[in-house]
Image: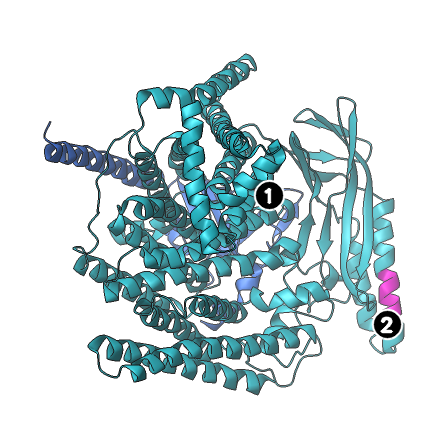
Amino acid sequence: MRLAGQILLIVALVIAAYGIFASVHGARSTRRGVGGRTGRAWIDSGRRSVYALAGTVAVCFLVLELAFLRSDFSFELVAQHSSSTTPGFYRAGAAWSSQEGSLLLWVFLLSGWSSLILFLTRRRARDIAPYATAVLLGLAAFFLCLLVFFESPFAGLHPAPIEGAGLTPILRHPAMMIHPPMLYSGYTLCTVPFAFAVGALVTRRLGPEWIRITRPFALAAWLCLGIGVILGARWSFSELGWGGYWAWDGVENAALMPWLTGTAFLHSLMIQERRGMLKVWNVSLVLATGILAVLGTFLVRSGVLQSIHAFGASTLGVPFLVLIAVMAAGSIVLVATRARQLRSEHRLDSLLSRESAFLLNNLVLVALCFVVFWGTFFPLISEAVTGQAASVGPPWFGRYVAPLALVLVLLSGLGPVLAWRRATPANLRRALLIPVSVAGATLLVLLAFGLARKPLALTMFCFAAFVLAAVTQEFWRGVRARRAMSHDSVPRALVSLVGRNRRRYGGYIVHAGIAVLFVGIAASSTFRHIDDVRLSPGETARVGGYDITYVRPTGRLDTTPSGSLEKIDLGAELRARRGGETRTLRPSRSFFPSNSGGTLSRYFEGEATSEVGLHEGLRRDLWTVVSPNLSTLQPIIIRGDKVFQEARSLPRAERAAALGEGLRRLVERYRAEPLPVTFRVLVSPLVTWIWLGALIVFSGGLIALWPLPVGAARRAAVDFGARVWNAAWREG
Amino acid sequence: MDPGLKRRVRLGVALTAAVLLAGALVYTSFSSSSATKSPSTLLASAQPGGRYELTGKVVPGYVRHGSSLHFRVRDRTGSTSVPVSYIGEIPDPFRRGREVVVTVRKEGSGFVGERDSLITKCPSKFKSEKRS
């Protein structure tokens, strides 16, 4: 199996190399006018090599997955990242918890998405597609080279160990199983518009076609990256024992940067589609997003920055740097040499127009990206400038990100109500009256509640109210106009309106979701209460308006379906009272056995994770973790180790039974003789709004992404939308 | 105003604003950053009361009581180590041999960790490091 996997990787590399040659040769022959049909045959062959690559890499990935599912410890990767006690669901996901497995996942997804776009465009963009194919295959070949020459996922162990090290406990969370494939899908999807932009620049076919082709993929990349980022934040909040969801860590930032530039592109491309403007800007954004996606992968794998998520210092840094340098230099040369073809067809008519709002939104997003980039790479920058590595912390990021985020939220409400080309003062007054009134009313209410001391949060709440009112107004006007023409009921008119203008109204839903999400971020970061309290059973402490009572200690042995011990859970039952409401929380700490140490002590000296006791609500989340006090157990564990050491001659079955009994008694002892333990209690208001906002954002994104049945329907919808809009304005 | 001149004025204003903002960004990043030190460089250059970001590996034999922790951090490749007293959130993956980053201040002969500043590298990512 391992050998088959290794051979298939080499075959995949050969296929990629052939595909690059076939695509470029075919494209050059066709452009020169020599070869004719033969040139097109080479191009088709190059495209088919992408399908063959996808199939070959899929089989490689399947081989690795089967090894994990069967716990085949002759695979070095399986022995290091899984075990027979790892639950089956997590075993399947353990494949991408390693450097090698995640690189294979990257190529698998890249070849899959490349196949999809090349299949969908097999009769379109015939000039651009061969060069895009070569770029996509070039990226795949790069990753395959890493897998074949540096980090093979099919390395073996002789003899195979009888048990593996197991999947890192903190990764045993459903969100962590979906988070990496989502992020990698986002990264790999970012390379699709990049490849088509390069193709368009090389062939100087810089009309709207390449943008139309790649727009859904840019949107899908944005969606997948966003989902990946939010799942990571959710995992951090509910699994890691620190109570936060974002730490401005280098690897977190790596996913955020292409998302920001991708968001900018999704807005500015509308200006190019409608007005033929911002061509240089758009192509630069697409190229930058592709480069940032690879830069993100480099950050995780090179060990160049201190990050809790980065793989250790490895040999992959230099190859990645070379790739990024080639991508950046090539992009700059291509844009510079095609400047004449990238001239705008129109100029900005007025600063009071939707184009201006989009342009400002783009500048804010790019500024945000620059801030994140500077902060992330500051250790390298400072070392280069001063000779001393230094880093900036979350307060530095907050100083710049908070005001930029405020402007961004304001613009997400302003953009939809501004007219294209030029908004007249009368139109503007009519469009802004309700949103501004709602924001003003929100301000008065919040001031009455004493929020004047938190100006940033106060401003964010008012801007979010403005956005929600603006979006609701747009929906209401659309529905009213639709009903005037079709006499449908309100729900039917709403469904019809959104269905016929998915891109536009999907976008509005995204804006509403962003407003909700930022309300959650502002409230949870400004008004949270956090405290460490030390309690004995029966004692109570007050945190953030809650009376927290330590009711009793808890403990249990967790076994797998096959009967082997997976972990020991030691924790506490807490009762939280606020007003008339009472909640029970059960935070605990899970101890996973290590492969070394004494017979008993290895169960307490391995990996340990905090299981958060969490009560979620629309108004606030109550979050708790516990640090169990093992003082009374330590002497027993040491004594037990000695007893088992002396009883080495016992038959295996008796030894296992004695061990089981010993562990059971330890847990009972923990429950029976409780000591004071330390709890971290966090009361975080509106944190659920972040997850709800993200759900709204992704729903809107899916609506915008969902294709219309036929092209004719789309054209009709656009015409209809324009009529509806005009009618709505005439009606006022 | 002539449309061409108007465009140039707007561009000038936008570029000036961008340069000013970038200048502020650069200035504040240098003025509010913490120097990253390994244990050996920290021992050689730390000033009393100075704030540093210490990075290295956890030496076996640390003492933990609830949220308070006394441990030593050694160079990644070497045995020079410094003692750190820390109170705050202790990341789940914290163990001997793990790579950590903690913000410290020099107090007396030892170092005191800033509350909740301790981070530990994710243990799933250690394999490549062993190889290098």
- Which residue carries the number 2 mark? A655
On the picture, is A689 further left or further right than A572?
left
Residue in the foreground of this view, choosing between A556 and A21? A21
Per the image, label 1 sits on a secondary structure element best described as loop
Residue in the foreground of this view, choosing between A321 and A642? A321
Q: Which mark is residue A242?
A: 1
User: x and y percent of residue A19 in the render?
Assistant: 38, 79
Which residue is depicted at the point 35% across and 32% down? Answer: A419
Mark 1 vs mark 2: in front: 1
Q: Amino acid at mark 1?
A: Trp
Judge whether residue B129 is colored magenta: no
User: x and y percent of residue A495 in the render?
Assistant: 58, 40
Disc 1 with disc 2 on a shared chain: yes
Residue in the foreground of this view, choosing between A387 and A581? A581
Q: Colour of chain A?
A: cyan
User: x and y percent of residue B108 in the render?
Assistant: 46, 40
Give yes or no for contact between labels 1 and 2 (Cβ–Cβ under 8 Å): no
Is A448 placed above or below A514 here? above
On the picture, is A732 further left or further right than A528?
left
Q: CA distance from mark 1 to mark 2?
A: 39 Å
Q: Chain of mark 2?
A: A
Judge whether residue A658 is colored magenta: yes
Per the image, label 2 sits on a secondary structure element best described as helix
* Bounds of the magenta segment: A656-662
